[in-house]
Image: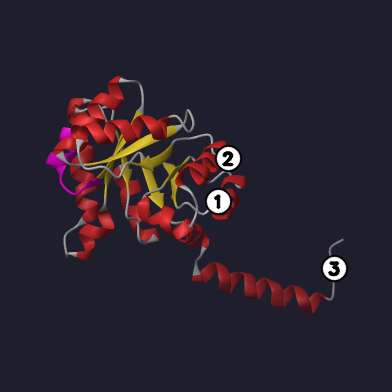
Amino acid sequence: MKFFVDTADVAAIRELNDLGMVDGVTTNPSLILKAGRDITEVTREICEMVDGPVSAEVVAEKADDMIREGKTLAKIADNIAVKVPLTWDGLKACRALSDDGHMVNVTLCFSPAQAILAAKAGATFISPFIGRLDDIHLDGVELIADIREIYDNYGYETQILAASIRSVNHIIEVGKIGTDVITAPPAVIKSMANHVLTDKGLAQFNADWEKTGQKIG
C-alpha cells in the first residue's frame, strides 16, 4: 500500500519523507489556502522534495478550461498528477489530459458507477472519499471494496486512492480490502505508531531500568 500525504505543509511532508513514509502527495484548493502560499511555488517545492506523484487540482468547471489549467499545472514538474473532479466535464478533461500523457487523479468519487467512468476515461488514480460518506451515515469502506471488485473483474489499471481518511482504522480497513494508495493528513499517518500497550510497556521498561542505576554509553 502506497502512502500519499494529504497536505500542502512542506515541513510536515519533509518530516515524513525523510523517514521514507511518503510515496506521493495530494493537495487541493482548501489545503493550498491553509498553506497560505502561491500554488505554483509550493507545488514546485513539494515536487522537488517527493519522487512520487503530486496531485495539483484544477478549479475550472468546464472541460476546456480544466484542460488548459491542467496543462499549466503539469508544466510545474514531471511528477504532477492533474486533479479533476468527477463530473462529466471532469471526465472529458481526464481523457484529454491522459491522452496527452499526463497523470490524472479523478477526485470526489462517491459511487462505484463514477469509478467505472473514471477508469474508462483513462484516470491514473480514482479518489473515493470514504470519510465524507461516513459523515452522511453511509459506509465509505464498502465503496472501496466495491470498486476493488469491479476493477479486478475487468482488469482496469486505474489505481484506487482512498481519500478523506479520518482514522487509523480507515487505513487498516482499506488496506485489508487491497486499496492501492491511501492519502491522509500527516497527523493520521503519525498516529499509526500509537498504541496504549506500547506506552504502558515503555513506561514499565523505563521504570525498571531506572532501578538498575545503569547508563548506556
Q: Secondary structure at mark 3?
A: loop
Q: Is residue 44 left or right of residue 119?
A: right
User: Which residue in the rendered view is the most extreme toward the right?
Assistant: 217
**On screen, residue 140 above or below 88:** below
User: Which image quadrant: the N terminus?
Assistant: top left
Of the numbered discs 3 and 1, the one sitting upstream in the chain is 1
Q: Which residue is mark 3?
A: 215
Q: Which residue is mark 1?
A: 10
The residues tagged by marks 3 and 1 sit, at their Cα atoms, a distance apart of 38 Å
The residues tagged by marks 2 and 1 sit, at their Cα atoms, a distance apart of 9 Å
Q: Position of residue 139 (x, y in %)?
A: 19, 57
Please report contact status of discs 2 and 1: CB closer than 8 Å, yes or no: yes
What amino acid does circle 2 point to? Answer: Met
The residues tagged by marks 2 and 3 sit, at their Cα atoms, a distance apart of 39 Å
Q: Residue at x 52, y 60 (%)?
A: 193
Q: Residue at x 63, y 70 (%)?
A: 202
Few, some or many C-alpha atoms within 10 Å of disc 2 (few <14, some 14-19, many ≥20)?
A: some
Q: Is residue 1 left or right of residue 164?
A: right
Q: Which residue is mark 2?
A: 49
Majority SS type along the magenta span: helix
**On screen, residue 11 above or below 80:** below
Q: Which quarter of the figure has residue 88? A: top left
Q: Which mark is residue 143?
A: none
